Amino acid sequence: MRSIQQDLSGKIAVVTGAGRGLGKAIADVLAGRGAHVVVNDLTLELAEEAAASARARGESASAIAFDVADPNQVEIAFRRIRGDHGRVDILINNAGIGDFVSFPEITPEKWDRMLNIHLKGSFNCCQAVLAGMKEQKYGKIVNISSVAGKRGDFIGNAHYTAAKAGIIGLTKSLALYAAPFGINVNAIAPGLVATELSDEMSSEMKATTISRIPAGRLGRPEEIARATAFLVSDDASYVFGETLSVNGGSYMD
């Protein structure tokens, strides 16, 4: 039986990068707990497929396409979402990319693209919802960081690590600002999760990563999704500015 405090019925949730992988798992869990989920992805086809699968289960979801790295697209998209649904109660900043390269392979273009999507994208979406959440004196924001943002990345993905560490700093600063307005801002720091992103890794790299995880396996998307759902529920009403590690024990604060 679902906890009353974790019932999200009537809430409007936006999940970025939710056409597949971790974002889709988060959207599925939030929809399953009663929220209307606005599924975002870069292409409308991916977003619509994910929203349609939720509707096929009798849940409430719609789709919208925009690039989180483009502030103009973000502004237009959230204006449309507010027009369609009246407000945004929950924002999950999940959109991101992978790029498994060593430090010498990081070009200025790779650096800029990584930070624009992960860090600037999270900032853009937070700014887009903040005024409305302040006005309604309620809001839940969860930014998806990474264990790499806490410890560094042994693979050498310095651009990814920097972006994810920046998300943790953004989360803390925004939480301090937003808490007096009734807005909870927190983050999740997953370890490596079994998604399309991890499929891009070489088998050797994946095996090395798993060997460093005490749990002995990759995370499952639904495990991260359920942790995210906790942070947007009333069960976490007194949690502000935290980064919850969900990593199989590979890094412990």
Image: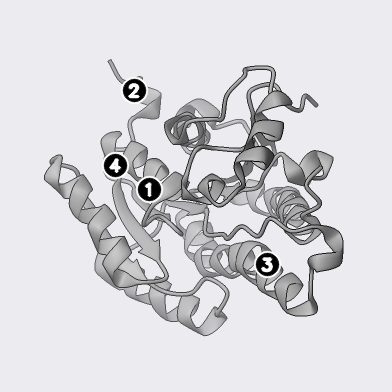
How far apart in space, not on screen, are marks 1 and 4 (Cα)?
10 Å
Residue nearest the viewer, comparing 39 with 99? 99
Q: Nearer the viewer, mark 2 or mark 1?
A: 1
Please, what secondary structure does the residue beneath circle 1 have? helix
User: What residue does disc 1 label?
Assistant: 24
Name which residue lies at 85% across and 60% down.
103
Packing grade of label 4 (10 A; few <14, some 14-19, many >=20) is: many
User: What residue does disc 2 label?
Assistant: 4
Q: Earlier in the sequence, mark 4 or mark 3?
A: 4
Q: Looking at the rendered structure, which numbered label has been put on residue 31?
A: 4
How far apart in space, not on screen, are marks 3 and 1 (Cα)?
21 Å
Please, what secondary structure does the residue beneath circle 3 have? helix
Q: Looking at this view, name the residue that lies furthest to the bottom.
A: 72
* Kind of residue at badge 3: Met
How far apart in space, not on screen, are marks 2 and 1 (Cα)?
24 Å
Q: What is the quadrant of residue 26 in the picture?
A: top left
Q: How many marks?
A: 4
Q: Is disc 3 in contact with disc 1, using a CB cutoff of under 8 Å?
A: no
The location of residue 41, given as percent across then percent down, is 40, 65
Q: Quadrant of the C terminus?
A: top right
Name which residue lies at 59% across and 70% down.
124
Packing grade of label 1 (10 A; few <14, some 14-19, many >=20) is: many
Q: Earlier in the sequence, mark 3 or mark 1?
A: 1
Name which residue lies at 58% across and 60% down.
97
Whether residue 174 is visible: yes
User: What residue does disc 3 label?
Assistant: 114
How far apart in space, not on screen, are marks 4 and 2 (Cα)?
15 Å
Please, what secondary structure does the residue beneath circle 4 have? helix
The location of residue 163, given as percent across then percent down, is 73, 59
* Kind of residue at badge 1: Lys
Q: Looking at this view, name the residue that lies furthest to the right.
A: 104
Please, what secondary structure does the residue beneath circle 2 have? helix
